[in-house]
Amino acid sequence: MFLSLCLVSVGLFLSLPGVVSGELEPVPETEGLFQELRKKVNDLWQNLLYPQFIRDSDWTAYATCEMKPSSKLDADKPQVTGQILFKQSYPIGKLEAFFDLDGFPSENNQLGRAIHIHKFGDLSDGCNTTGGHYNPFNVNHPHHPGDFGNFYSKEGKIRKYKSNLSATLFGPYTIMGRSVVIHEQEDDMGKGNNKASLENGNAGRRLACCVIGICDKNMWENKFSKFVERKKRGSQNEHRSRPN
Amino acid sequence: MGCSVPGWAGSSPGLGLEFTVQMSCQGCVDAIGASLQGVPGLRVLDVRLDTQSVLLETSLGAEQVKELLESSGRRAVLKGMGGSMTQNLGAAVAMMAGPSLVQGVVRFLQVSQEKCLIEGTIDGLAPGPHGLHVHEFGDMTSSCDSCGEHFNPEAECHGGPLDEHRHLGDLGNVLADNDGRATFRLEDARLKVWDIIGRSLVVDAGEDDLGRGAHPLSKVTGNSGERLACGIIACSAGLFENPKQICACDGVTIWEERDRPLAGPGRRVPGQPAPHL
Ligand SMILES: [Cu+2]
Ligand SMILES: [Zn+2]
Ligand SMILES: [Zn+2]
Ligand SMILES: [Zn+2]
């Protein structure tokens, strides 16, 4: 997008060598300066009001997180991989997310596993350096913006769409550049009757984590159209199987 | 905004680093003090046994200091970093990896409104200069190919870090030595940590011509070749911003996580001493 703009200006410059090497007329010069100034002021305002990544993509922010097993995890633990995609429209849209995770034991009646946003995206010591739950408002667990609750795997996979989430991609409390962590155990949702329960839900070891990064809309749109199709097919099948 | 860095009232403009270092007795504390004594460009400010923390100020890179600390046989994890200003600015880290064997750690610190410090170590490079750029997306789904183009919110052409006309993400070149390691500390007046969180850092196979070459790609990418390694620019802790030495989710210290990775029963064996290395 910006690339092409840049090339256009290079092209203009190259196509006008005669004008450039000749005497410069003063009028376009000041006009240019004025326009440049106006553009700068305008840009400043735009940047204050709307962060760059929203303007790049139709007033909607998209993010992705590539889940990888913690580098500090034992080989006999579930090696979880997959992707979490986020979408939020500016300024009042609520965060939506697709969770696609693989690598869980395939036996059924698995317990739930907790997924949270942690404060840092620092994976320099595996998932251990991601800090605690992201807690910008100093509240108890499970009221942190990134407390996504428990997820249940089916045939070794988690496939889940969630909407109306309270975390945000915008403003001073953005989750961009922070991490998503999946734990080995179930989140007690603050009902564990101990201090840790109100901090982290006693969800146990960190199996896998990822950094939330900016992306374009393509992956979300692909995923979403497949999701809608599946839903449609699902409801048609329901109709067909219903006895008339 | 975002990943804030509580101020640190150091006297010189060095980098403040706070490490968690595995140590269990006063002997370890003394040994660490001794091992860092006399290292040029490094000043130990505080070593604490109770919190297993080492605070120091240095002109060296964080990875270099970590290696120095670990050379004494003790594990060290960077807990936070900060500058000498007392403002809440920003800190970030990019873990570099990719399709090649090239890997590294690069840290960003917003030292003041006009100064972003970028310091890192990247290994596995061919000796010589390599282009280094911030790219627009923090998307590794197709490794470094999904990182998008150079971060360029001002619709400029590619340039060098000191040029007026440049992509904001143009950081020029880093130089790999004969062992294939690039150790660098750059300062950039235009880049702001809060603008690049969630984007990516990419190191390229060749030299960035800073937009001055004859190749058609010169004004686009600096013609610096294929992308060797990349990492998402992620929020990291400022000094003292990560007060717990334990991993907050389940109450075990990071050493237990690393050395006794047990879950379930027997997880919290009381009074078991940390290994004395
Ligand atoms: Cu968690
Ligand atoms: Zn929580
Ligand atoms: Zn590049
Ligand atoms: Zn560039």
Image (cartoon, helix red, strand yellow):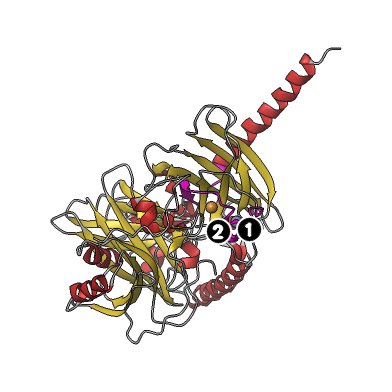
Q: Which residues are magenta?
A: A190-218
Kindly tell me whether mark 1's CB lies below 8 Å from ligand 2. Answer: yes
B113 horizontally vs B178: left or right: right
- The location of residue A189, given as percent across then percent down, is 65, 51
- The location of residue B32, given as percent across then percent down, is 23, 72
Instruction: Compute the Cα span from label 2 to label 1.
Output: 8 Å
Residue sitting nearer the eye, A151 or A59: A151
Residue sitting nearer the eye, B43 or B189: B43
2 and 1 marks on the same chain: yes
Residue sitting nearer the eye, B183 or B60: B60
- The location of residue B149, given as percent across then percent down, is 43, 51
Kindly tell me whether mark 2's CB lies below 8 Å from ligand 2. Answer: yes
**Occupied quadrant, residue B254:** bottom left
Instruction: Please give the residue where the numbered disc 1 appears in the rendered image.
Output: A141
Residue sitting nearer the eye, A42 or A146: A146
Instruction: Please give the residue where the numbered disc 2 appears in the rendered image.
Output: A133
**Residue B101 part of the magenta-drawn span:** no
Q: Secondary structure at mark 1?
A: loop
Instruction: Specify the quadrant that holds the N terminus of chain B.
Output: bottom right
Relative to residue B146, is residue B43 depicted above or below? below
A222 horizontally vs A70: left or right: right
